Image (cartoon, rainbow, N blue to C red):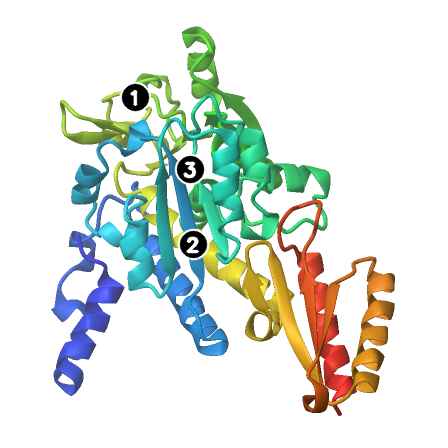
Amino acid sequence: VLNAERFNEATEWLLGDKAPPTDNFGLDATAWQPSPKLLAGGELGRKTLEEARKSAELFASVHGRKPSLAVITVGELSRYCHGDRRLDIYSNGLLSWFSKGSAGTANNFDVKEITLPKTTTTDELLSQIYSLKQYDGIQLMWPLPSQVDASKCYNAIEVNRDVDGAHYLGQMELDPKNATPMPPVTPAAAIALIEEYGVSLNNKFVLVVGRSRIVGAPLAYMVNKSGGIVTVAHSEVSTDNLKALVGNADVIFACAGSPGLLKTSWVKPGAEIISIGTTFDEQKDLLVSDFDNGDLDDIANRYSPVPGGVGPLSNGFLFKNVAAAAWKRAQTTGNVDDTWNRTSGTIERTFHFRNYDSALSFSDDVNSMSRELDHHANMTFRHECVDGVDVTLEFFTYEANEVTDKDYTAAKMVNEIARKNTK
């Protein structure tokens, strides 16, 4: 299978003026293409990752550093047991969910992958999360071991660093008009895939099979926003009810991660099928979807292949979120990262003045600002005799035991006060 557009671009790059005047060397491009029924995500995944790379390169040129991502995994996730084999199956490993480190490096992102033992406690995981405040994005892999308070740990990740979209559903339900959380990666990828192929959800009966907090639930919300008449099912629904729901659906998103849960024979002719939940079958040495072995090509109007459907988009959408988080963080922190020292849980900066009068005037202005902001700095004076006075300010948020946006706001305002006092 070849992409005609990319083939012609490569031909022009390779041959230049010697390229033939006709596209595709005069060959029938349709002979290279997969079935028109396939909702293939490879090319869209490549373009999405390319968009993320360009954003990362621009960010680095402006701010002198790469956007950064920290990925935390607790224990060994069952779906990752065959990660290496899954990588072999993909035609482009950089589009695979199992190659975040190499994909990040290749696309100008700094990625730190952290694996904690399965015995990790809630407090230990929280400590790890709090230690990663220098990263633009944090992804905490799901599921977590039963002894870990998942709610507490996910809530410890600030919304503006939540590149996996764990806060998306709650934020959107609280303030749907004004909230701007980053979308969860896989649901966003699934919606992008159907939009790419012109699959409309408006006024369609849409079945989402799967109810997880990171895929099924937010996907159902997105479908509803797109005008779909959405029903959510799951692996505990009785076979008879599941059969009836599948048979009535115009569009089916299968994201239960339960091989063979759904029967192809249940699908009504002309339905659109998007397979999200995939499982590696070790005996067959294959990735399999939630559908059985029936031929969807015979009954569906269009369907996403496994592999090669939604999967290749996931990394691109993750790194797009990381780039967006980096830009937003830079906007929030302003010049603070360049002028203040970041320590564990605090930011501090020392200002030098030629005499006490100047230092006191500066500190009075800072104190006035602090009262208005209701956020005060720890302030230390050091007299250097004829060399003047050093004033050191330290900000941190006691309740959060960490540096927050409020600290950055105060630091930016102090920088402006210092600029005016040194004119």
Q: Secondary structure at mark 2?
A: strand
Mark 3, residue position: 141
- Vertical position of residue 410 compared to residue 204: above or below: below
The mark nearer the N terminus, 2 or 1, is 2
Residue 287 % position (x, y) = 23, 32
Q: Secondary structure at mark 1?
A: loop
| Residue in front for this viewpoint, 56 or 192 | 56
Per the model, the C-alpha gap separating discs 3 and 2 is: 13 Å
| Residue in front for this viewpoint, 107 or 304 | 107
Residue 323 % position (x, y) = 47, 61
Please state if 201 lies on the left or on the right of 366 as rendered.
Answer: left
- Vertical position of residue 130 compared to residue 57: above or below: above
The mark nearer the N terminus, 3 or 1, is 3
Residue 221 % position (x, y) = 58, 35
Q: For mark 3, does the 10 Å Cα neighbourhood hold few (<14), some (14 to 19), or many (20 or more) residues? A: some
Residue 395 % position (x, y) = 69, 61
Q: Which amino acid, mark 1?
A: Pro
- Vertical position of residue 281 compared to residue 228: above or below: above
Tell me the number on the disc at residue 376.
Answer: none
User: Is residue 378 visible from the viewing direction of this image?
Assistant: yes
Per the model, the C-alpha gap separating discs 3 and 1 is: 22 Å
Per the model, the C-alpha gap separating discs 2 and 1 is: 32 Å
- Closer to the eye: label 3 or 1: 3
Mark 1, residue position: 259
Q: Which amino acid, mark 3?
A: Met
Quarter holding the C terminus is bottom right
| Residue in front for this viewpoint, 28 or 58 | 58
Mark 2, residue position: 69
The residue most toward the front is: 385
* Residue located 21% across and 45% down the image: 90
* Residue located 31% across and 47% down the image: 312
